[in-house]
Image (tube, rainbow, N blue to C red):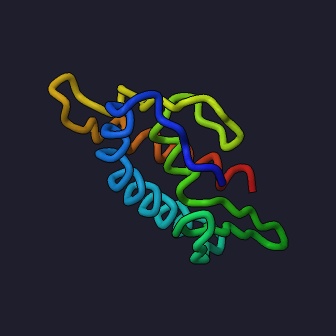
Amino acid sequence: MIEPKFKNAQEYELAQVLMQPIFIRLLDNIRKESELSNYDVSYEEINEPFPSYIVAIKKENKTEKNNVWELCFQVCFNNYSESTTQPVTTDKTLFEEDGQLNWQTLDEKAKTLVKSLFSSN
């Protein structure tokens, strides 16, 4: 996993505001989706290249593993992919006009990503 490069200091600061709420919403949506389905979900702590978790979503004999920070990055940044070498920009729709978090959009984006994880398995 490559740590994202930021376009500028403002993008970094916006990401700092977003990452914890995104992390919490992703984990909560993974929990909810697993409770509604026949999937087993487990987490593995890793320390390279920096502390994170791998979420394993298993159904029958098929397991899909994803780095939780990579999932957070997909919600936080516009058009993020783990192979990108271009500087990232935050998704401004995750903020209200007054600068507050747009919780509804954040939650919808997290839910959509989580549903895609479960449907691809």
Residue 104, horizontal then vertical, whole percent: 31, 38
- Dividing the image into 4 quarters, which one contains the N terminus? bottom right
Say above or below: 7 vs 65.
above
Residue 80, horizontal then vertical, whole percent: 59, 35
Say above or below: 30 vs 96.
below
Q: Residue 93 sits in which quadrant?
A: top left
Q: Is residue 3 left or right of residue 121?
A: left
Residue drawn 62% across and 68% down? Answer: 48
Residue 9, horizontal then vertical, whole percent: 35, 33
Residue drawn 34% across and 56% down? Answer: 20
Q: Is residue 16 left or right of residue 31?
A: left
* Outermost residue to the left: 98
Q: Residue 37 sits in which quadrant?
A: bottom right
**Labels in figure, total:** 0
* Along the line of sight, the residue nearer the viewer: 119 or 46: 46
Residue drawn 47% across and 35% down? Answer: 6
Residue drawn 15% across and 26% down? Answer: 98
